[in-house]
Amino acid sequence: MFALFLACAPSAPMFIDKAGIDKARVNNDTVAACAGLSMKDAEVRTYAAEKLSTWKRPQPCVCEHLVRDGGWDAAVLKGLTKVTEDERVACAGDLLDDAALPDRVGLARALSGFLAPAVRARLATAAAADADPEVRAVAIVTLRPDKDESARAILVAALADPLPSVRAAGATALAGLAATAPAVATLAHDPEPSV
């Protein structure tokens, strides 16, 4: 019986290109489309992520392919930036939880273009409390203080951070907001010239 199941179950193709992903989409062949996330060609991986993000239901293979060769996969992330549904891309923000992942600063930059609220919230958490100050600095400039009071609070708190890069990122993100002018004015006395 098990052998019959294996014979009937679709197998992932060894190679698939953009045209093959389009065909898989038309045929509702998630196995073939998911195979696109494993291809060597970064453009194919991006295209596969874009197409899979529009499937009727979220496809778990997208989250399973966010890490490649021990690091985060920029191509797959690129294909997900315009997705607004948390259930499809929250796992991308969760990558920041892995302190051992290489180039978390680059990951924060890649996530800064995401539209999904869960990813934006994860960046806000990183801006407020990430152990890596460079990740905090990158996450800080992604906040939208003009639309979010809690973002303003995180940025004002960043102005008192012991690290100049974090203070500078907070000041940059707050620049031009009248509501935060008093907090930004305190930077005029900052001992670090780069701030």
Image: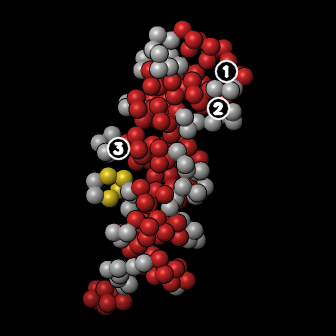
Residue 125 visible in the current orientation: no
Q: Earlier in the sequence, mark 3 or mark 2?
A: 3
Name the residue rendered at 36%, 53% in the picture.
72
Q: Which residue is mark 3?
A: 103
Kind of residue at disc 2: Pro
Regarding mark 1 in the picture, which secondary structure is present there? helix
- Locate residue 64 relative to residue 117 in the image: left or right: left
Residue 38 image point, x, y percent? 35, 69
Q: Is residue 157 above or below residue 117?
A: above
Question: In the rendered image of this protein, does residue 67 appear above or below residue 169?
Answer: below
Q: Which mark, residue 163?
A: none
Rate crowding at label 3 as few (under 14), some (14 to 19) or many (20 or more) other CA atoms within 10 Å.
few
Check whether the beta carbons of the residues at disc 1 and disc 3 lie within 8 A of each other.
no
Q: In the rendered view, would you say 73 is above or below 111?
A: below
Q: Which of marks 1 and 2 precedes in the sequence?
A: 2
Reading the image, the residue beneath label 1 is 180
- Residue topped by disc 2: 145
Q: Earlier in the sequence, mark 1 or mark 3?
A: 3
Q: Nearer the viewer, residue 23 or 193?
A: 193
Label 1 near label 2: C-beta < 8 Å?
yes
Element class at badge 2: loop
Q: How far apart are the two marked residues, 1 and 3, measured between alpha carbons?
A: 32 Å
> What residue is shown at x 62% (from left), y 13% (from top)?
185
